[in-house]
Amino acid sequence: MMIFQLSRDTRWTHAVAALFFFGALAPDMALMAQGMENKKALDTIIGSDVEEEKARADADAARIIAAIDNTVAATSEVRKTSSLDKVDIVYLTDAAESGLPPAIDAKVKEHHKDILDLRKELEGNAMLYHAIDSHSVLMRDVLAVEFDDHRGVTIYAAAKPQK
């Protein structure tokens, strides 16, 4: 049996009371946050036009492979990016349905660790993460990111657009 000796110092009771008070408020904290369903909140967070396009991976394989080969530089750019004028999400629907074409699949395997690092950086960049998440793209489906010279980025994902 443990016996606790309580001192006459009441500071600990105030600390415990404060802990319970703030703990009781915690469930309501989520109610004060802006949801991702709120278009205005999304526009404020992302701050960019987010466009979607469907493409076939095999039709644009050279560009996708070049983006995968450039993953290390793109990861560094994601880390530094805080605003963009345009975010383009390219859904590679054929890859989502039947797998990647062999040439792209080989590049993904070759750069597997680099792509994992890219995904972690995307998760850490609030603007890009919310752009991707708001279009129901899972981070595991992101294959490559390509920045352009006009403050824009193209995100390639082996996914289907939301309905």
Image (cartoon, rainbow, N blue to C red):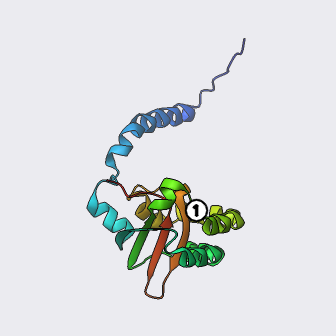
Frontmost residue, 14 versus 59: 59
Question: Which residue bears the numbered disc 1?
Answer: 119
Which of the 4 image quadrants contains residue 121? bottom right
Q: Residue at x 35, y 71 (%)?
A: 51
Relative to 11, residue 145 above or below: below
Label 1 Cα crowd, 10 Å radius (few <14 / some 14-19 / many 20+):
many
Residue 44 percent location from the top left of the image: 33, 67
Task: Describe residue 38's horizontal placement relative to residue 113 as left or right.
Answer: left
Q: Residue furthest top?
A: 1
Give the amino acid at mark 1: Arg
Residue 4 percent location from the top left of the image: 67, 20
Which of the 4 image quadrants contains residue 160? bottom left
Rendered-image quadrant of the N terminus:
top right
Q: Residue at x 61, y 68 (%)?
A: 104
Which of the 4 image quadrants contains residue 65? bottom right
Residue 115 percent location from the top left of the image: 63, 65
Figure disc tally? 1
Residue 21 percent location from the top left of the image: 42, 35
Relative to 64, residue 21 above or below: above
Circle 1: element type: helix
Task: Describe residue 160's horizontal placement relative to residue 141 as left or right.
Answer: left
